[in-house]
Image (cartoon, rainbow, N blue to C red):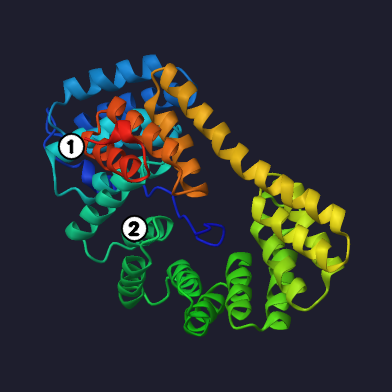
Amino acid sequence: MSGEGVFRGLGVWLACAAACCVLLRGDPCAGQGVEEARGALDGARALAEGGELDEALARYEALAEAHEGQGWLLREIGQSLMDAGRFAEASPWLDRAIKVDGLDVEAVLKAALCRDALGMSGEAARLYGRALLLEPGHARAAFNLGRLQIEAGELEKAEATYRDLIARHPNHWMGLNNLGLLLVDRGQPTAALGPLRRARALQPGDPGVMHNLGRAHAGRREAALALGWFDRALAALGAEDLSAVRLHFDRGGALFALGRFEEACAAYRSALSLDPGYAPARLNLGAALANLGRDAEAVEALEQAVAYSAERIAILHQIAVNHMARQDPDGALIALERARRLDEGNARTWTLLAQAMEARGDAAGAEVAQRRACHLGVSAACP
């Protein structure tokens, strides 16, 4: 399933300052312990943001040793590394915070966000689920869990997650949008219109909601209505925005359905100008050209679609192999997650995923990936 219309919502909430009022050495709630720790934390944060990671990590370690067993501090260190975009380095600190206080829902959420940012969707989903066990009404955890369930193709679970989220937070417009999108992809475009219209009432100018309303009407074979929403979404987003690839593609589909093949070709070419490797646009461009009687151009477009589709996955595999050679399994997992989303049935992707997860110490994840590779015909992966 495409993720173009799914809101990711990976912004990180800052921890409540009141959480710092815990038993630090020197009676922090009386004053000085927290202030000293905060000053040291800010200094280390500045080093991390400035790219001096080794020095920052050394200071974080010294700070943690000076205030041993303080879960809030470990969480704050993880947060500061996340703020610097250092998700791989942040994860161990957040794991330590959870070990100190397994009921700290914000530490669990931040650990989930780190895994999410690194492309480790399975671990992220597990942690979002844990956050919801600790706090069933946690909107951020529920929203992101539902998104990952959509990306994993677990649409029934995602629907249940989003319906519970919306029952608790009726005005969560991003949840309403994602619920509508997954209903479209489950073949229920009429049911999708309700949550999508509610989302638009709450966020009338959002191009993603307009796009998904167009997709719902397209699913109902209402091509003219769909085209109207796609045009509004494109005007709001901008035709040259890099995230408009799927929007141009869907607009081309509406034009195709209306028999406006020349305009459909232009829409598909707009998608390809932003992402030359977007194979579905090449396939549909070929079909539109064929309907115009331009057979030679149609064949060329279709041949390019095949070449691009295979090439993108092969390139991602090579990127992953390069990361593994540099002892960077996290980087490999990010590339392989992209490859998996392009083709769930690619055996080499699952073989490399098993190797990367094993290198990272995720034995359970490696076993799952290895079983999938075996199922896809890789005899060496079978027990």
Q: Nearer the viewer, mark 2 or mark 1?
A: 2
The image position of residue 86, as x and y in percent, is 42, 30
- Tell me where residue 312 sits by quadrant: top right
Give percent across and percent down for residue 231.
74, 71
Q: Which mark is residue 145?
A: 2
Q: Is residue 309 left or right of residue 327?
A: right
| Quadrant for the C terminus in the image | top left
Label 1 element class? helix
- Residue ID at (83%, 74%): 260
The residue carrying pointer 1 sits among few (fewer than 14), some (14 to 19) or many (20 or more) residues within 10 Å by Cα, namely many
- Label 1 belongs to which residue? 71
Q: CA distance from mark 2 to mark 1?
A: 24 Å
Quadrant of residue 328 within the rendered picture: top left
Residue at 44% in and 48% down: 345
Amino acid tagged 1: Gly
Please state which of residues 321 and 332 is positioned toward the viewer in this rendering. 321
- Is residue 185 shown above or below 121? below
As drawn, 148 above or below 28 = below
Asked whether residue 31 appears in the rendered view, the answer is no
Left or right of 32 on screen, residue 50: right
